[in-house]
Amino acid sequence: MSSGGESHRSINLIEPACTSCMICARECPTWCISINSHAEAIKGLPSGSRERSQNVLDRFTIDWSLCMYCGICIEECPYDALEWVGNLTGPGFASESLVEEMVTPPS
Amino acid sequence: MTEVAPEGWLDAVEALQAEGFDYFDWLGCVDEIGRRDCLRVVLVVRSLSRQAEPRTLSCSLPRDDPRIDTVQGVFAGAAWHEREAAELFGVEFVGGERRRLLLNPEFEGTPLRKDEVLAARTGMNWPGGKEPGEGDAAPDRRRLVPPGVPDPAVWGDRDASQPAPDPAEVADSAIRPRRRRT
């Protein structure tokens, strides 16, 4: 991460660290974060053990037309899955195009 | 912090100024709903000429009719602070400047009172209302109520034949995400 003012230009999701816990979406004062996730059974558990599931992140969007860059989501994330980065958010022709998909769809 | 009665507010500020605390620092307001049914006005003055701790005055005003004397005659700079407290908390500073400072002239309400409801949000779909593991298809199962929006049982969906909700109940209900009652 670069230093000074260049590091606070947008917010990035560190996808592997996100547990879809919804804390950022609940803390966000402007309601700009939306999360979709589903529960999936954990495979490869030792035989005889109880079935367990984990949440898998499907979709994580930040609406840059609403975000006020307060950083509360970054502060609140217990898994450090959000970070400040130096990239500027892209321009758009309509407010919908400012909704950024943060999760790369599986290929 | 020195507690002053509303009638003695102006005298107390003048006395501090005469004592040498002639630098007005700030004036603010706190909504103490939930603890007591009052608004607290706080004023801090300092002395620049001698080493002394800043002095803090506070005054409790009833929430339904908060009036206090202006101190703009003592410290002209207090006008901005008083105008801000007046429009955000609905405090009347008797004899003071009455123009709005920050809000639109058309705006109605007192945004920093804790029972102020973010009405536009009651009809919106809150992204934080979902539980972890929920996808798109679960809006009717929402059990969490977002901050700033009271529980529908208290404010919105309340039985019309019942008396209006108590401000403390609305404030408590709107303060943070919480489970719905129903």
Image: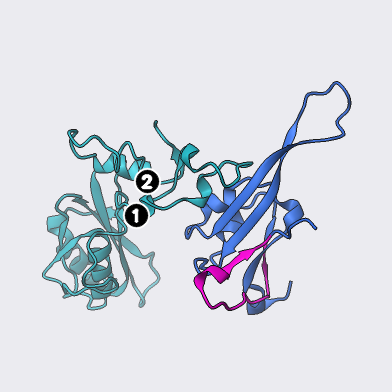
Chain colours: A blue, B cyan
Residue at x-position 49% and y-position 66%: A66
Residue plotted at (77% across, 56% down): A106
Question: In the rendered picture of this protein, how many numbered marks are placed on residues?
Answer: 2
Q: Residues within 10 Å of mark 1 (few under 14, many from 20)?
A: few
Image side of residue B95 versus residue A55, left or right:
left
Residue B168 in picture, x, y percent from top left:
28, 41
Three-letter residue code for mark 1: Leu
User: N-terminal of the two: label 2 or label 1?
Assistant: 1
Q: Nearer the viewer, residue A103 or A18?
A: A103
Q: Which residue is label 1 attached to?
A: B118
In the foreground, B157 or B20: B157
**Image position of B30 (left or right of A35):** left
Element class at badge 1: loop
Extent of the magenta region: A83-102
Which circle marks residue B174 in the picture?
A: 2
Dot 2 falls on a residue whose secondary structure is helix
Estimate the x, y position of residue B84 in percent, counting from the top left: 27, 68
Answer whether residue B36 is visible to the viewer in this image.
no
Q: Quadrant of residue B48?
A: bottom left
Question: Which chain hosts label 1?
Answer: B
Residue B66 among magenta residues: no
As rendered, which of A93 and A32 lies closer to the eye?
Answer: A93
Name the foreground residue: B118 vs A98.
A98
Horizontal side of B133 relative to A93 (left or right) equals right
Decide: marks 2, 1 in contact (CB < 8 A)?
A: yes
What amino acid does circle 2 point to?
Ala
Q: Quadrant of residue A55?
A: top right
